[in-house]
Image: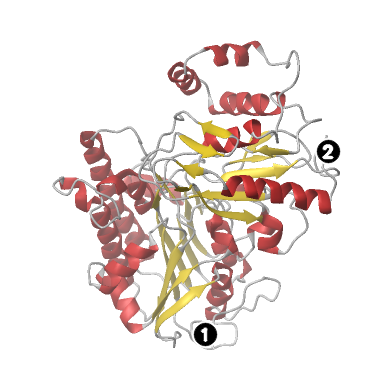
Amino acid sequence: MKKDGTSSSPLVVFGFDAGDPGLLHRWGMDGTLPTLGSLMKGGCWARTAGPEMFCEHGMWVSLMSGVSRSKHGYHYFRQLVPGTYDLAPARGRCLEVEPFWRRLGGDERVAVIDVPDIAAPEPQSGIQLSEWATHYPYFEASTFPAELLQRIEGSFGPRRVIHEEPESTEEGDREIYRRLMERVRKKGELCRELLTGDQFDLIVVVFGECHTGGHQFWKYLVEADHEAPKSTEMGNAVKNIYQAIDREMGLIQGVLGADPNVFVVSSVGLKPQWPAQGLNEAICWQLGYQHAPEGPSGFSFTQTLRQLLPQSWRDLLSRALSRQAQEKLISEKFRSSTDWSRTRIFCIPSLYTGQFRVNLKGREPQGIVEPGEEYDAALSELERDLKQMIDPVTGQAAIKTVYRTAELFDIEPPRELPDLFAEWKEAEHFVDHVVHPRGEIHQGKTGFHRGTDHSPYGFFAAAGPGVSARGDQGDIDPLDLVPTFLSHLQIEATDLPGRAIPGIARV
C-alpha cells in the first residue's frame, strides 16, 4: 500500500554485475535467456551510455544513487587524495552517498541483496544483505537486521569469495567455473528463502558471478570477436553462467505472489584488453610531462631494494605484505618519485585506462600550471601526443578515445577526478610498446596480467503493469534510472540530475 492509499505492483530490480550488453541482448532475443527474453518481449530494453560509463568503478554507486561521479568522485579502487600527492584505497560504500531506497519512508518494505559498492546495511523496514556473494568484496558480509547473518550462515554457510586468477590453467578455470555455478544456485536459494511469504515494495538483487566469470572465461567465449578455442568444454562457460542467473531470476519472480514491475540492469560490459599501466606512466615520463627528482630522491631503503629486484620477485614480495603495507609502499613511491616543481602533468597509476592529472596551481600542493589557458594548452598537448601513439602490431592508433573530464561533466577542473582519461583500443594481444614520433614507449607485464577490461556500455530492460514502453529504446543515461525506479514507488527526486524515463516510469 502506497502513501496515497492506493495499491501498486512491487518493484523488482535484478542486476547483472558487468553483464555484457551485447551478450544480454543477443541471448535475450534468441531465447538463450528466457526470463530476460520474456521481459524484452513484453516490455522494452536499452543500452546505458554516456559520461558516467567511462569507468567501471563507481558505476553501481551512480546506478543505485542517481548521483553523478562528477559529484561523488569515485572512479578507481585507488585514487589521488585531493590536496596531496598521496594515493589511498577508495571504496564506494565509504562515500557519503545514499542508495535510492534510503529515500523511502518507514512504511515501505525493502529487500536489498548484494548490491556492490553501496553503503553497509542500515535500519530500514525489511532486510538487507551485503558482500555475501559479490565480485570482489572488500568488507565482511553484513546484514540488517544484524541477526539475519547468523541465520543465513546457518542455512547456506559463510560467504563465498571467488577471486579471478588471470594466470590460471584450464583445469583451474574448470574449478572456478564449478564454484561460480554452485554459488549462483545457492544465491537463488537464499533469495527465495528470504523473500517467500513476505510482502515487499522493493526488491533489489545483484548477481556478481557474471563479472568474475566474464573476466575469467572470456578467452574461451565462442561468441566473442576473437579466435577462442572452439573445441574446449569451457567454450560455453560464460553463457552457462548467464543462463544460471537468468533461471534464478525466474524462480525468484515465481515466489513473489504478485505482478511486479521488473527491471534488469547491467553496470558495464566487457572487452578484450590487456593492461597498459606501464605505457600510461611511461608516456608522462618519456615525453617530458613528468620529471624525477635530481640527485637523491629520498626513496626509502625498501623502495630502493624493490627497484633492484626482478619484477617476478617484486610481485612475490608484494603478495607477502599486508594490503595496508602494500598501499603504503605504492603511495610512498608515487609521491617521492616525482619532482613536482618541474612536473606539468602526471599519471595516476591504473591498470587499463590512462588517468592523467595536471599539476595545477591552487589545486595541487606544488602546482606549476596556471588555470585557464595554460591548463587547456597542457591538456591539448597531451591529447595530441596520445593520438600519435601507434600500435606496431596493427599499424593503427593505439588510443581509441580521449576524455576531458571538465568537458564531459561541464565542470571546472575536477577535485577528485583526473583531468583526462585515455581509453586504449581493444586488443587481443598485449601491447608491450607503442611508437611515437619522438621514440618508442615500452612497458612490461604487471602482476595482474588479465586480458579483459570493461566497455563503457551497460544494459537495461523493463516490463510490468507500470511499464508502457515497448521495444528498443536506444541509448539511455544511467542517471535516469533512479528517478525511474522512484516513480514506481511514488517518490519524486527533483534534487537528482537524471529524469524519469517516459514510458518506463510509472505515470
Residue 267, compared with residue 35, is above or below; it is: above
Q: Secondary structure at mark 2?
A: loop
Q: Secondary structure at mark 1?
A: loop
- Identify the residue at horizontal 67%, vertical 46% (top origin): 382
Tell me how far mark 1 sits from mark 2, CA to CA.
52 Å
Q: Position of residue 22 (x, y in %)?
A: 35, 64
Q: Name which of mark 1 and mark 2 comes first in the sequence.
A: 2
| The one of 309 and 424 positioned closer to us in this rendering | 424
Residue that label 1 marks: 506
Residue that label 2 marks: 368
- Identify the residue at horizontal 50%, vertical 13% (top origin): 309
Does the rendering let one see residue 452?
yes
Would you say 390 lies left or right of 449 here? right
Q: Position of residue 38 (x, y in %)?
A: 29, 77
- Give me the disc on residue 61: none
Q: Position of residue 174 (x, y in %)?
A: 22, 40
User: Is the residue marked by circle 2 packed among few (<14), some (14-19), or many (20+) residues within 10 Å?
Assistant: many
Q: Position of residue 111 (x, y in %)?
A: 46, 64
- Tell me which amino acid carries mark 1: Arg
Quick one: quadrant of the C terminus?
bottom right
